[in-house]
Image (tube, rainbow, N blue to C red):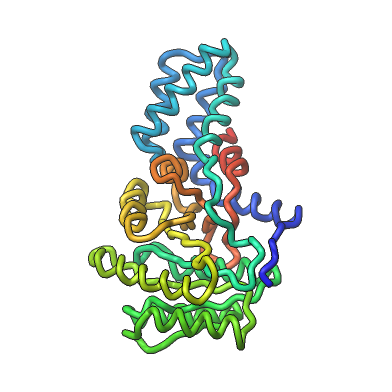
Amino acid sequence: MFGLFRKTPAQQAEDEARIQASLSKTRQGFFGRIGSLFQANEVTDDTWDELEELLIQSDLGINAATALVERLRSRVRKENIKRAEDVRAALRDELLKLLAHPPLTNIDEPRMLTVVLIVGVNGSGKTTSIAKLARYYRARGKRVVLAAADTFRAAAIDQLKIWGERTGVDVIAQAPGADPGAVVYDAIRASQESRKADLLIIDTAGRLHTKYNLMKELEKVHAVCARQVHAAPHETLLVLDATTGQNAISQARHFKEAVQITGIILTKLDSTAKGGIVFAIEEELGVPVRFVGTGEKAEDFAEFDPRAFVDAILAA
């Protein structure tokens, strides 16, 4: 049974360290300048204007940035906060509130088999993220199987098989052009019977330009999962590329129309100097970031920790 996974203090520290290390560009960019704003002795009207501008430039988005600054200014007036360092502490609290959406479901709840659906556009790092997620749980003692249900592209199947070999995880696949529902059915049966797996991770096609077909395909995959495993899929994680900024929000809205997204895997966090996209995702979509890609290696992957993230980006 896939028992409730509780990270050890060492594993928690490892995740926090990966997040902090991946944010060096963000700290040196707009959020680094935000941290510097509050090293002065007093906060002026110019401070607020500059803060709002920096938040917008950091990919937080105009609406979210404006609302955040207004809430912060109101709090400063109401609580009679004078010192810049106390304003900075209040900013930290307000940023954390933006990341307060609880997971709708949890991969780690006890189940005979946990089924996770991965969606996202081609080129977002979807296949690599699947491999990293598989490695992440396999390193923690879980038996993992991958399903190559992106049958539209032969390269997607081949790439998943290569990652399966690298990470020591079985991949269930059929020929290119096969019915994705049939692949998922076979993968569930194999996971339950011959592989005795704890976790099945399913790759899906990412063809936004044929949104109607994408929606129907995802609905079919959902239905197969639900018929074979109680309450499956238990998670539907959308992969977004952090370097695409506000374009990632547009992608997310399309997928949210097609399927109920329970969380985000944010890739290339180490490659962006902005980082505000994390807040924009949760503010505009109401969906939590669950995992982040922190580098190019298979082990460069961490469970997202809002406190570690906010503390890291505000570190002066």
* Residue 168 appears left or right of 262: right
Query: Where does residue 313 sit, x and y in percent of width and height?
Result: 55, 39
Question: From this viewpoint, is residue 275 visible?
Answer: no
* Residue 134 appears left or right of 263: right
73 shown above or below 35? above
155 shown above or below 231? below
Image quarter of the N terminus: bottom right
Query: Where does residue 161 sit, x and y in percent of width and height?
Result: 48, 82
Residue at point 58% right, 80% down? 169
124 shown above or below 72? below
Which of the two residues, 102 or 172, is positioned nearer the viewer here? 102
Question: From this viewpoint, is residue 238 visible?
Answer: yes
Query: Where does residue 182 sit, x and y in percent of width and height?
Result: 41, 83
Residue at point 50% right, 46% down? 25
Image quarter of the C terminus: top right
257 shown above or below 147? above
Which of the two residues, 89 or 42, is positioned nearer the viewer here? 89
Figure disc tally:
0
* Residue 135 appears left or right of 63: right
Residue at point 45% right, 44% down? 282
Query: Where does residue 180 sit, x and y in percent of width and height?
Result: 38, 79
Residue at point 48% right, 85% down? 186
